[in-house]
Amino acid sequence: MLSRAATAWRMAGVKVAGVLAEEDGDAVCAAGFLCVIGSGKRFSIQLDAVPAGTSCHLDSRGVEAACAEVLPLIATADVVILSKFGKLEAMRQGLWPAFERALAAGRPLLTTVSPKHAAAWRGFAPDAEWLQPAEGSIRQWWAVAGGGSAQAS
């Protein structure tokens, strides 16, 4: 849904900044890459081997590199889409700086939140609106957050 919203908004002339998760068919976890909206630049976020003491294949370096690519784009964006607020962001790592910058700049921000990290999200963005995972919810949100400009289909 995030990808479809980004595509529709961009086609309507809306400036969208952010990253979307892309699956890697060979990956252990669902997302193997973060792709920068607009440029298509991809960053691997999947480790080849699990570090000792964990079962997570997430490569924080790839997430942080994708974040660094997005940070300068936020200032001129109409809307920011960041694939997920999860483990790294709950620890104020990963995409955390992009979340901070988007909120500080007053940009509408669309993301998903891992249920395990909902409390951390609420602590970061207590006034955030929770949407149902449906395109109609995103359209209604954008009609208000985007000032009634182009609709995602």
Image (cartoon, helix red, strand yellow):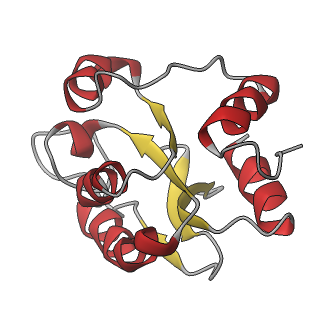
From the image, which quarter does the C terminus lie in?
top right
Q: In this view, does 100 lie above or below 141?
A: below
Q: In this view, does 49 lie above or below 29?
A: below
Give residue 41's position: percent from left, percent from top: 56, 81
- For this orientation, the residue located farthest to the front is 147
Of residue 49 and residue 139, the one placed in the foreground of this image is: 139
Residue 8 figure quarter: bottom right
Of residue 94 and residue 127, the one placed in the foreground of this image is: 127
Give residue 37's position: percent from left, percent from top: 61, 69
- Direction from residue 20 to residue 127 in the image, left or right: left
Of residue 57 and residue 49, the one placed in the foreground of this image is: 57
- For this orientation, the residue located farthest to the left is 53
Residue at 15%, 47% in the rendered image = 92
Residue 25 figure quarter: bottom right
Give residue 13's position: percent from left, percent from top: 79, 69
Q: In this view, does 102 lie above or below 61?
A: above
Residue 141 figure quarter: top right
Residue at 83%, 45% in the rendered image = 151
Of residue 106 and residue 39, the one placed in the foreground of this image is: 106
Residue at 79%, 49% in the rendered image = 4
From the image, which quarter does the N terminus lie in?
top right
Give residue 140's position: percent from left, percent from top: 74, 27
